[in-house]
Amino acid sequence: MSKVKYKFNTKSLTYEKVKVTFKQRLLQVLSYLAIGLVFATITMLIAYRFIDSPKEKQLRREAEVLKLQYDLLSKKINQVQTVLNDLQDRDDNIYRVIFEAEPIPTSIRKAGFGGSDRYKDLEGYENSDLMKAATERLDRITKQLYIQSKSFDEVVKMAKGKEKLIASIPAIMPLNNKNLKHMPSGYGWRTHPIYKTQEFHAGMDFTAEQGTPIYATGDGLVEVADASAQGYGNHVVINHGFGYQTLYGHMSKMATKPGIKVKRGDLIGYVGSTGLSTGPHVHYEVIKNGEKVNPINFYYNDLSPEEYQIMLELSSKSTQSFD
């Protein structure tokens, strides 16, 4: 039951009973409710602003885990891109060069994707930019891997097609020249040892003991094995195909015959000094499309870069050939 309220009347000097109307009571109740609502709203705003709910805490933890996973994924993508870049560089500058194929243009390797709506489904989220960037990087790598795979397919086809060429090209020295102990007289103008005139020496001479084995420098078919050519004495000519021939002169003894198929490294004769020669050695020539070329460019299966440089210096110092 509500209390009865009185107020003091200063004129009559008496207490008079206060009469409260329904409207006043209603306003009073509404004011209390308004004040309570204001305080409740402020409390809720503070709580939402500074205090996480259990669900928010769970979502925040999940977001942190996703961020960590994204960072790890980004690092892996970077590693894959680094490896892919190395493969692309090797493909363009080594493998395709070996087989005389044009490198794949960068405009094709690094081409983007058409269409502005490609990643439209990823828009509208809090981390849309992050998801779009990661997805686009993966798409680019996927496309580059596809192009690289196709390129390797082409390289394999070229390798199979040129497998015979690779085996046939003269690629070793005609005798075992470990530690470069056999001194060469190189390709170029030299003093003839017998006539003492300046003549063009169209091959390389390797000094060696009488009877040292001489080997075929590439796969091929023996065309000549006789002493019919003037000056060469006992000599062998091998046709390797693809426009390549090799000649081995001044043998003491031949170990093959015309019509015999030989493999790189097969024994074909022995060092001697037959024909126009001043001492035991093998005269070696490489003929490409009918022209005699410098054999020193065809020892890449035998020589390291350092050994090649030594061989180059030794062959260029000699001023007199042995035949």
Image: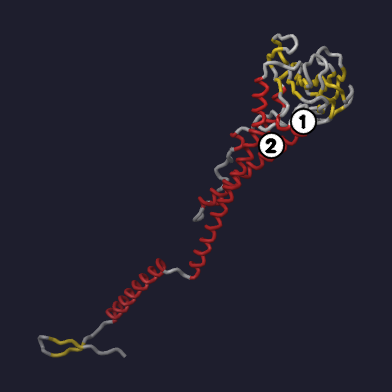
Residue in the picture at 42% in, 69% down: 51
Residue picked out by circle 2: 151
Q: Quadrant of the N terminus?
A: bottom left
State the image coordinates of residue 200 (x, y, percent, origin top left): 71, 13
Q: Is residue 47 left or right of residue 9?
A: right
- Residue 243: tell me if it is visible: no
Residue in the picture at 70% in, 16% down: 320
State the image coordinates of residue 253 (x, y, percent, origin top left): 87, 23
Residue picked out by circle 1: 176
State the image coordinates of residue 138 (x, y, percent, origin top left): 60, 47
Tell me if mark 1 has few (under 14), some (14-19) or many (20+) residues whose alpha carbon lies within 10 angstroms of its own: some
Estimate the spatial distance between the alpha carbons at disc 2 and disc 1, rounded to whole Å. 38 Å
Q: Quadrant of the C terminus?
A: top right
* Quarter location, residue 244: top right
Residue in the picture at 34% in, 71% down: 38
The amino acid type, in three-letter code, at marker 2 is: Ser
Q: Nearer the viewer, mark 2 or mark 1?
A: 1
Residue 51 or 205: which is nearer the viewer?
Answer: 205
The amino acid type, in three-letter code, at marker 1 is: Asn
Residue 188 or 131: which is nearer the viewer?
Answer: 188
Q: Secondary structure at mark 1?
A: loop
Q: Secondary structure at mark 2?
A: helix
Residue 259 or 43: which is nearer the viewer?
Answer: 259
Q: Is residue 202 left or right of residue 57?
A: right
In the image, residue 152 above or below residue 130: above
State the image coordinates of residue 208 (x, y, percent, origin top left): 77, 25
